[in-house]
Each structure stands twice: as structure tokens, then as C-alpha cells.
Amino acid sequence: MTTAAPRVLRTAYQESIAAYWNNEQDPVNIRLGEVDGLYHHHYGIGEYDESVLAGPEERVIAELHRLETAQADILLDHLRPVAPEDRLLDGGSGRGGTSIMANRRFGCRVDGVTISEKQVAFANEQAARRGVSDRVRFHFRNMLDTGFDTESIRGIWTNETTMYVDLFELFREFSRLLERGGRYVCVTGCYNDVTGGRSKAVSQIDERYTCSVHARSEYFRALAANDFVPINVVDLTAQTIPYWELREKSSVATGIEKSFLTAYREGSFHYLLIAADRI
Ligand code: GPP
Ligand code: MG
């Protein structure tokens, strides 16, 4: 299935991103993951149960985790149908949560790629603990240049990872990897280019994660340029605001909560799901 992998880290920027994720140990990710062993690097959606605020603190942690898992479930809903013999790719797989959920739901082979060697080791350890290492594998590879075979994959997703890369380069690679009729699902934060450029709150998010949030229009331009046709576009903004409100009140708040809440409430930023088919 695989050819020799090309050099993974190609630029000083990519090296700095890899270093960030190799050192990341934030309680907002670790403590939530410990709830049930699904470690996420994305945000949540849905209403929260206000009674958790009465304590104990573990209830807030579990509730934030439940909302993050609900986000991954919605993403996977848009990948269907997937058969057990299909193969899926997780572009920027983090600590592996969404990949493990995809395998659990579809029973298929899942490959995750990330430029963080720490994340690769961590996620492979999770797969081993669950006894799914034969079906779920994490690789130290660059999603812009995976080295996987052309038209070998049925479905690809990126769960909040596209703000680290050029979308035209990324979708060129995904277009190559997918079978005809294969599906790509993206959950992302993007800035609203109807209201102008990057707002101050969006710039704060960029600064916090060393990323570069794209304009909403950029996604559709880059998809169309690479033979992807959107079938569903879901604005999840209203559904993610409660997650940020609960997180802001929690003991695991990191300080970025205000920027997300401001950006979403003022309309300068959207939390978007895009599902597109490779024609
Ligand atoms: C990190 O998730 C997600 C990103 C760095 C992408 C930025 C996302 C946008 C929607 C702009 P995480 O779970 O590692 O972040 P945190 O540590 O804040 O929970
Ligand atoms: Mg997190």
C-alpha cells in the first residue's frame, strides 16, 4: 500500500508546529481524554447540562469531553457510508481519538498521519491498548505529502487541522489519495470574509496556536480547484458556543476561551463542517 515516505518536516514553520505538539501536555486535553481513553484535539458541540457546574469538578471535565466526542460523531456521520473493507485517512490525527471512533463505528482500516512523533507514539499506544493496532495505525507523515498510494482511500477527514497548511496543496494531495466518489469531511474554524479580513479575536487564535485560520471562501476555491464537490456545509457555530461557555467556567480553561467566544459572537469566525465528494 505504501511507498517510501518523503521527508516529513520540510520547513522551519512545520518544525515549529511539530515542536509545539511534541511538548503539549495541556490538562484540557489530557484530563478530558482520561475520562474514557479517547484523546481529542478538537472542540465540542451541543448544549451542556448546567447541573455539572454544581460540582464536583470531574462532572465538568466529563461534560466537556462528552461535547468533544459529540463533535467527532457528527464528523463521522458525514463520512458514511463506509464499509469494513474501506480505508480511511485522518489528516492530522493528534492523539488519535477520532480515528479510534471511526474504526469502532465502521470496523475499517484507519491510518492517521501527524508531524508530531510524540502524538504518533501516544496514539499507537492507545490503539494497542484497545487491541486495534492491526486496523488503526498512526504514522509520522506530513498530510501534504503522505506517500500513500493514489486512489487507495475511500474517505478522508481533517478535524481542526487545516489552519496549519495551504489548502490548495492539501486538497491536491487528498484528491490524489481518494478513489473517485470518495468523501472528504472537514471540520474547521474559518474567518468570515463577508465582514472583512481577520478580526482581532481571530488573530489571537492564530497567535495562540501558531496557525493561520483561512477565509471561508478559501475552502471552496481550493476544493473546486481539486475536483471536490461539496454535498453538505453545516454551520456549527451556534452549537459550539455552549462548549466554550462551559470551558470558560471550568478549571481547565486555558485563556483562549474569550477569543473564541468573541469571534463567534461577533460573526467574524465560523465553526464549519464541509463534506465534499471527489469527482
Ligand atoms: C487544537 O485543539 C486545535 C487547533 C490548534 C486548531 C485551531 C482550531 C480552530 C477551530 C481555529 P486542542 O484540543 O489541542 O486545543 P486546546 O488545547 O485549546 O483544547
Ligand atoms: Mg482540547
Image (cartoon, grey):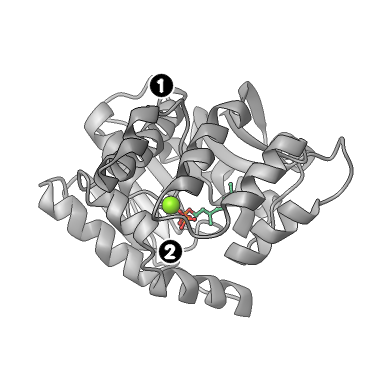
- 10 Å crowding of disc 1: few (<14), some (14-19), many (20+): few
Furthest residue toward bottom: 12
The residue wearing badge 1 is 80
Seen in the picture, residue 56 relative to 9 is either above or below; the reply is above
Element carrying mark 1: loop
Mark earlier in primary sequence (1, 2): 1
Amino acid at the residue labelled 2: Arg
Q: Position of residue 82 (x, y in %)?
A: 35, 24
Taking the image as shown, residue 260 lies to the left or right of residue 243, namely right
The residue wearing badge 2 is 141
Seen in the picture, residue 211 relative to 80 is either above or below; the reply is below
Q: Position of residue 72 (x, y in %)?
A: 40, 35
- Which residue lies at the image location 26% right of the left edge and 34% below the top edge? 108
Q: Nearer the viewer, residue 185 or 66?
A: 66
Q: Position of residue 80 (x, y in %)?
A: 40, 21
Taking the image as shown, residue 29 lies to the left or right of residue 249, namely left
Element carrying mark 2: loop
